[in-house]
Amino acid sequence: MKRNCWEFNHCGRELGGEKSKNLGVCDSVTFTAFNGTNCGFNSGRYCWSVSGSLKDGPKTCVHNPPLEDCTQCDFYLFVKREENVDFIN
C-alpha cells in the first residue's frame, strides 16, 4: 500500500488518531468501497470523493488550512502525479 491521506496530511482522524476521539474517525479511513484504489487503504487515496469537496454532500475533511477545493490539496496533487492520471476528466 502507498501513503494514505491521513498519513500524508497528519490530520489525526485515523483509527486511534489524536483527533479521532473529538472529531471522529474520517470517512476516508472507514469507507471500504474504494479499498485498493490508487493502491490505498479503504478510501485513503481517493479521499476527495469520500470526505472532500468532490463528493455529494458536505465536506468532512479537516484539512489544515481548510481548502474549498480538493483539487488544490497537496495530497490530491501528489496522488495525481504518482498515479499519472487526471481524476476529473
Image (spheres, rainbow, N blue to C red):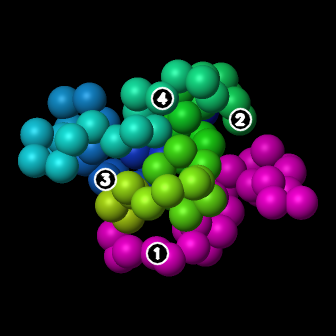
Label of residue 38 in the image: 2
Left or right of residue 2: residue 64: left
CA distance for labels 4 and 1: 21 Å
- Residue 7 in view (yes/no): no
> Which kind of residue does numbered mark 3 sit on?
Cys
> Which kind of residue does numbered mark 2 sit on?
Asn
Tell me the quarter of the picture where residue 76 sits. Answer: bottom right
- Residue 52 x/y as whole percent: 51, 57
Q: Which of the two residues, 80 or 28, is positioned nearer the viewer here?
A: 28
**Which span is picked out in magenta?**
64-89
- Look at mark 1 in the image and give the residue it sits on: 67
Tell me the quarter of the picture where residue 72 sits. Answer: bottom right
In the rendered structure, are the residues bearing label 4 and label 1 in contact, judged by CB atoms less than 8 Å apart? no
- Look at mark 4 in the image and give the residue it sits on: 31
In the rendered structure, are the residues bearing label 3 and label 1 in contact, judged by CB atoms less than 8 Å apart? no
Secondary element at image label 2: helix
Q: Is residue 32 magenta?
A: no
Q: Callout 2: 10 Å neighbours few (<14), some, many (20+)?
A: many
Q: Residue furthest left?
A: 22
- Residue 67 x/y as whole percent: 46, 75
- Look at mark 3 in the image and give the residue it sits on: 11
Left or right of residue 38: residue 11: left
CA distance for labels 2 and 3: 20 Å
- Residue 6 x/y as whole percent: 40, 45
Nearer to us: label 1 or label 2: 1
CA distance for labels 3 and 1: 13 Å
